[in-house]
Structure formats: structure tokens, C-alpha cells
Amino acid sequence: MELYGGIDLHSNNCVFNLIDENNHVVLKRRVKNNLEAILILLVPYRESLVGLVVESTYNWYWLVDGLMEAGFKVHLANTAAIQQYSGLKHGDDDSDANWLANMLRLDILPVGYIYPKEQRMLRDLLRKRLQLVQQRTKNLLAIQGLYDRHLNKRLSNHKLKQLSQEQLAADFTDVNVRMAVNGNLMILQCLTVQIKAIEQTLRQQLRLKDEFLHLTSIDGIGLILGLTIMLETGEISRFKAAGNYASYCRCVNGARYSNGKKKSTSNIKNGNKYLAWAFMEAANFAIRYSDTVKRYYQRKSSKTHMIVAKKTVAHKLARACFYVLRDQVEFDVNKAFGYS
């Protein structure tokens, strides 16, 4: 007898629903989020289980990794693509788990990508670096704002990072303002130390894989952006076409049209926000340093808003990245941005 399992995962517990090939429920149980207890529950069914489905929630790592290490075949469900019967009057955790199992049984499960565990940890560390960089920028801008507001003085980023307690005491006689500036400065300095430590660790453990070396031939993509794209993309073969990859990078406009009129936006947040950031950053650098890309951007921005024009550049870079990775070729800026 073949069994199919669905797991509705929550913050402190998960609901299991095992069904057979005829959709008869074999097991229905709520268990606390404890891997040992979960394995005790599932091991008797391991030989019969075709697979277990877990939704891609914020806390799926420990459960999916633990089940896979115990020899279970696990599928990560793409929550954004899951649809249930719209006329359903009553739904609960049991029905959600049962539907996950049924989608696997019926072979209609929208599957998410389970990133290899070791590389996932490096990817998440790189994501943490980005988070800290953004927080550092917020504190830097806050200090610049305080100087501008109270002293009508503009500080460059370089001078700001060299601020000392003596300089703050000389600049701000009011203790309250000085304490506000010092608070931002202390956080900024602490973040800088942590960012450098993360970068050093990443440099020791990471290098661009051979299949990703051509990434740096793309205008606007250096080492950090190249590593980000490598770790966030994973296997390029999981994308059928350039359009699929660009959509995953959030470089495709989400909209619904009827009778030639735009009715609404849709699915604009589907995809990978880190790749979206990476290609927008690459677009900024490419516009600055590549004459061909700059001419393309100027032509587009003369007809539409500059943000839309910049996103168009990011879209082209994402599509170019797909072909560079799939075909293992150098980037040709004229093919991507040449005048048609």
C-alpha cells in the first residue's frame, strides 16, 4: 500500500495527515515541534510513504532537513501556487494537511526548490550581510540628517565613518542631540565590524563555481553580486527559459489586463527578493560604467519614468545572466542592449 503524507507546519506544532492511494486517511495527528517525536510517529510508515509534503513556511529548515536525513522523501510545497476549492465552507489544519497529501497523490503539487543544506547556510550568511548593510545605511543616513538639521552641515560618508567622541562633543553642545548622534554612531561602528567579519568568513569558504565564472563578464556584476546570484539561483537548469528566470528575479511586471485595459497588479512579490535587489544593483553599476547600457537607459528613460527604465535594464541583465549560465558563454553587451 502506497501512502502520501501532508504536514501543516506551525510555529509550535505540526499536523500530520497520511492517506492511501484511495484517499482513505491512515493517520491524522497533531504533534509538537519535536523532531524525535515526529520520527517516532513516522518511522513505522517509512517504507510505504511515497513522499511527505511540507509547506514552504518561515521555519521549515529543521523539519525538512531532519526528515531527509532520516531517509524520508520530502517535497517542499510552493505556498503561493497552492489553490484549494474556492467553495470550501470549512477549513482547518487537518484539511490543509490532507490537501497537501492529496496534491502529491494526484501529481498536481506545485513544488518549491529545496536548496542543499550546506550551501543554504552560506546563502543565509550572505543574506545576513545584506541585512546588516541596509541597517548600517539607515544609521549613516540618520547621522547625516542630524548634522543637516542641527548644524546645516553635510558630512560625506568617509568623514562620517571617522567621527570620534571628541568631534561629537565639539560639534554638539546639547547633550540630548549629542546622545542621539552617538547612539547611531555606535550602532554603525558595531555593524561595520560585523559586516567585515562576515565578509572575511565568506571569502574563506566561498568562490565562484566554474559554471558561474562568466557572471563577472556581465556589466555591473562584481564579486559580491556574483556570489549573491550564484547562491540565490542554485541550479540554472531548474528554470525552463529566460522568462521564467527573470520572473523568479522579480524583473517581470505583474499585471492583469482585460479589453486592453490594466485591471490590477498580481503576484508582484512572487520570486526571490534578493535576486531582485542584486539585478537592480547591477543595473545601477552597468548604467554608470557601460556606455552601451547607458545609451539604452537614456533612450528608455526619455519615454518613461527613470525607475521603470532602470527595471528594464535589470530585466535584460537577468535574461542575459540566464543565457550566460545555461550556455556557459561570455556576456555580449551588444546582443543584450544594442539598438534594434
Image: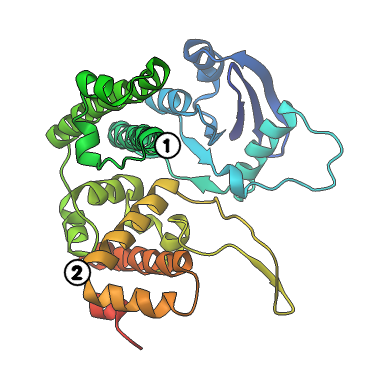
Left/right placement of residue 196 relative to residue 311 reads: left
> In the rendered view, would you say 323 is above or below 6?
below
> In the rendered view, would you say 163 is above or below 324?
above
Residue 148 in which image quadrant: top left
Residue 1 appears in view: no
Mark 1 — residue?
149
Left/right placement of residue 189 relative to residue 205 reads: right
Q: Label 2's element?
A: loop
Q: Nearer the viewer, mark 2 or mark 1?
A: 1
Q: Rounded to the nearest whole Å, what is the CA distance between mark 2 and mark 1?
A: 51 Å
Quadrant where the image shows the C terminus: bottom left
- Residue 195 in the image, given as x and y percentages of width and height: 24, 30
- Residue 43 in the image, given as x and y percentages of width and height: 50, 18
Mark 2 — residue?
329
Q: Which amino acid type corresponds to the residue marked 2 in the rendered image?
A: Val
Q: Label 1's element?
A: helix
Quadrant where the image shows the N terminus: top right
Question: 291 or 320, which is in the foreground?
Answer: 291
* Residue at 33% over, 38% down: 130
Left/right placement of residue 222 relative to residue 315 reads: left
> In the rendered view, would you say 311 is above or below 278?
below
* Residue at 59% over, 16% down: 12
Q: Residues within 10 Å of mark 2 (few under 14, many from 20)?
A: some
> In the rendered view, would you say 263 is above or below 78?
below
